[in-house]
Image: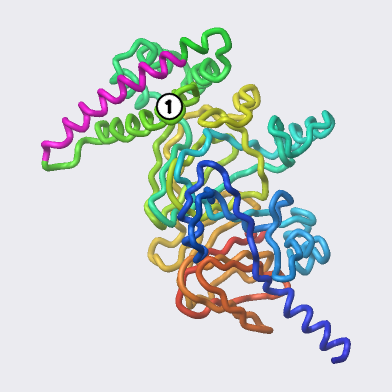
Amino acid sequence: MDAVDGARTEVAQDEVIVLHNAVRAYAWGSRTHIPRFLGESPDDAPAAELWLGAHPAAPSRSDDGDSLLARIEADPVAMLGEDAHDRFGVRLPFLMKVLAAAEPLSIQVHPDGERARVGFAAEERAGIPRDAPHRTFRDDSHKPELVYALTRFEGMAGFRDVERTAPLLRLLDHPWADRTAARLLDGPAFQALRGVVSSLLTDTGGTAALLDELAACAKAATQRLHEQEAYAQPRNHEPDPAVREAIRVFSQFTALAEHYPGDPGVLVTLLLNHVVLAPGESMFVAPGVIHAYTSGLGVEIMASSDNVLRAGLTHKHVDAAEVLRITDFTPMPPPYWNRVDLDRPDYTRIEPPVDEFALLVAEAPVADLPEAGPRILLVLDGDVVVVTARGRHPLSRGQSAFVAHHAGPIAVEGEGRVAIGSVPTS
């Protein structure tokens, strides 16, 4: 083989890299979803997240054991393309995950880019190890994220309009709830919400009393839940929206209070939008939007960051001051994200307002795919073949591959469904 042929072979082998991905065993993870997705037998360990990408904390690896991070650093322009390299440097700007929640994740919020850079630099100067339990900023990137549901997917995201929250709180017929309802309607909503959340997260003098309030509110919610369900059941039609919302909110609240009886953050959940995604639906969570996922299997794509600031439902580090600093307390509707082309249920392109990522979910065979830049392809169902100008690369359900920029346009043949993360063109 001469030098030219050798170079062509190396390029062909490097253009599509089959990935081996790390599973993160967080306690809230499902023990069955991800193993079954990968075609493996479940065991007793929770499998919460499957990471696909080049984040330094858990980069994907190739068949020969090289990390995707090292491959990109060795030839960034060929792997990422000039456009992505110019904008983001020597890094894959997005991270994909398969997320499988059996129990609630922490109430959390992600920083914007400026706060991430400032906070990360301050902790670096302070010499706090990046893997320290009390570390707040793991890297210097913001972390907008999008979730695409593979099963029914449930969670909370953003503060509900106070005009809807106040009546829900008054249904509890409890002094704390009544005081909070009045407080929410007194003055600008964002100021009122910030004040309520601040009192819950920073209460140092009356923590025992606050936990008594939590227990009493949970007991009241259980009673009201039974009343609302009894009201709805005899009717031959759907209950009105206010009753449905009360049932959802109180069901979630009582379950969380039972699971986290010593966590004042459970009371914060009464203020948040309840979000339910059917398979194929998605939601976009911008930096500053408080959220928590509670159950389901989905594909996540986000800016390549591990910055998570927790506000409750957790035994991990809670940096209340930083949470209050970066959270957007402006009420908002549930952050559902509509598909771009609703006339093609077999082809869903999702492009939220960020520079780092877009997501495409499509049924094979399909040729209308991102033509340039770094791409990660995950097979959701079936058996497919990734076709480039130089070769064919078969993949099955649960398998994934990195497609380098220099591979050029690709097509996906076979019978199956794929999710493809990519970088929008500038």
Q: Quadrant of residue 239?
A: top left
Q: Is residue 204 above or below residue 138?
A: above
Task: Note whether residue 115 is visible.
Answer: no
Q: Is residue 410 left or right of residue 299?
A: right
Query: Which one is in front, 263 or 236?
Result: 263
Q: Residue at x 51, y 31 (%)?
A: 313
* Residue 332 painted magenta: no
How would you classify the magenta stretch by its main secondary structure? helix
Q: Is residue 273 above or below residue 353?
A: above
Q: Identify the secondary structure beneath mark 1.
A: helix
Residue occupied by mark 1: 271
| Label 1 Cα crowd, 10 Å radius (few <14 / some 14-19 / many 20+) | many
Residue found at the very far bottom of the displayed protein: 1
Task: Note whether residue 47 is visible.
Answer: yes
Q: Which residues are magenta?
A: 211-235
Q: Position of residue 324 (x, y in %)?
A: 60, 24
Q: Residue at x 41, y 48 (%)?
A: 153
